[in-house]
Image (cartoon, rainbow, N blue to C red):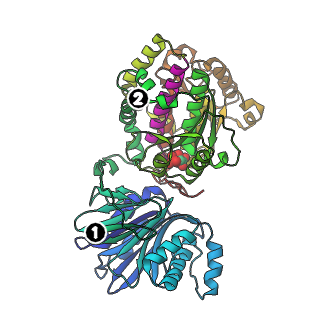
Amino acid sequence: MCGIIGYIGKKQQAKEVLLHGLHTLEYRGYDSAGMALWMQNQIQLIKAKGKVSVLADKVNDDAINSHIGIAHTRWATHGVPSEHNSHPHQNKRVTLVHNGIIENYHILKEELLQHGYTFTSETDSEIAAAYIDYCYTQTNSKLEALSKAYHELKGSFAFGILFDDDPSTIYAMRKQSPLVLGTSEDAQFLASDISAFLAYTNRYIILQHEEIAIIKEHQIEIIDLQQNVLPKEVIVSELDVQAIQKDGYDHFMLKEIHEEPQAVEKTIHSYMQDSIEELKESLSYLKDIDRIHIVACGSAMYAGMIAKSLIESQARIQTDCVCASEYRYQQPIYTKHTLAIFISQSGETADTLAALQMAKEEGCLTLGIVNVVGSSLAREADHVLYTKAGPEISVATTKAYCTQVALLSLVACYFAMKQNLLDANNISNINKDLKNISSTMESLIQQTSYRDLAKHLYEKEHIFFLGRGLDYALCMEGSLKLKEISYIHSEAYPAGELKHGTISLIEEGTPVIALATDMDLYEKTLSNIKEVKARGAYVILLISENLKEHVTNDACDDVIYVPETSKFLQGVLTIIPLQLLAYETACLRGCEIDQPRNLAKSVTVE
Ligand code: F6R
């Protein structure tokens, strides 16, 4: 959701660095792009509706020569996607790019109108530019103006700012929205994430709330809102530029699915080597928990649903899984020993962060399950467990989801051991399955021609997913994956629920993807599957390998066998065929797989 990049340095043309950064940030989702460049003693704006490539065509002009600039990909919130609403926004002496939402923009706008300001866009961001200019007029100091604006602008923001009387500096500040600063000897950068400048430097500084960055060609100075200079740690990123390339795959999504076995292995081995019993010590801070809330959005919430099912069934601890945007308004009930788990790939999802804030205010112990190191969620939760998915570029999550499920399975194992509900035999079987999990995942990725199966799906208008228990939680994610990238309407239903109404939608040829990998429930699920098959549904059945004898003509048209593993790990296997079916279906429909329409990777607005 909105991407920011800024550059100052002599070595490269600003337009090249900014375009490269914007391309790298495309994965966040956007509908227009723009840049502001210092050229011939003034700031020039170049904007384009649509793709970064349209902007690239506009700046592909030898006359455009600059070494300092800021740029932006916009995901529309206030005002339609258009050139005049796209960033950078300029109002009087201030030009800025903004990620976030200024919640009190209409009040500030009224005030600014009274002081003679006029506006050319419908955005809250232009109000911010004008308001900073207004503060500059009042204080006659850029830093005081930024500090005053910081206090007055409500909501969330990451800004890259140029003043038209200061051609050698970029200013930056943030509240909630992400912003990192890249540094090298002869060039400095700011960006929404480090991938945007990783081709130039792997050294970066995390800008915190209530800090202002003063960025010049050879140095970055960080000050607080009272203008005290702050010491800053330069971090060296271990990220490899290779990790953000497609590496010969047609899409990042496919590459990322192929990376799942490794990512899951890495995640598991960060917390245990040989036995889940090692978790007793590493997770001992979770010892007195009697109730659990799991809070997240989208796929992360569906990973949470798997954890809920496992923790309740295997550890017998009451667990609720709620989407973050509802959680805050449900007036959740906390016991003295409630643990609230917040799951997020980006660690920047606004709803999840707001829910975390509320749980903390209620005095609840909080645990973040996060992929991006140093993200807001990672910093703000009491404890954090990192998934080791590496950078995920495709907007639709695959490997990050898989690592969330794997890590939550370990948390569920911990609680089950804590409650003395796993005996030595159970523990030894889980350890064996954990050892094999990545090779089993690899074989499942290669196993079937998912493209052939997708041929039965890609021309359909509606597709249903059916399953019970853990399988139902997986159906929710499988259905989300399919609809977000292929734009085919799909619904996930608990297998037993369909006949209470929705079965009327099943007609000759309606595709049903049915899951029967939950060994405790497969018999009942199979009966439900036969009910839809008898009404003409085209059934693709995902079933555990050891249930082969149940695969009959009255149960399915096609079958995918999923290797059997411990209940704790079943989710990371069963999801793979669903992700690949979604991927192949979207490919056959010619969809833009890595950047589906209207979606953003990091949803930094509530
Ligand atoms: C779907 C997807 C989203 C995210 C959700 C939460 O493929 O990626 O549903 O899971 O927006 O994002 P994070 O995990 O960054 O909090």
Secondary structure mostly seen in magenta is helix
* Image quadrant assignment for residue 201: bottom left
Q: Amino acid at mark 2?
A: Met
Q: Quadrant of residue 170?
A: bottom left
- Distance between the Cα atoms at labels 2 and 1? 47 Å
Relative to 44, is 199 on the left or the right? left
Nearer the N terminus, badge 2 or badge 1?
A: 1
Query: Which circle, 2 or 1, is nearer the viewer?
Result: 1
Look at the picture and state if 319 lies above or below 2.
above
Which residue: 52% across, 31% down?
286
Where does residue 12 sit, x and y in percent of width and height? 25, 70
Residue 379 x, y percent position in the rendering: 46, 48
Q: Which residues are magenta?
A: 396-419
Going by the image, does 599 lie left or right of 204?
right
Q: Which residue is mark 1?
A: 219
155 on left or right of 170 = right
- Check disc 2 and report the residue beneath it: 441
Examine the rendered structure and indicate whether residue 357 appears above or below residue 491. Answer: below
On residue 359, the disc is: none
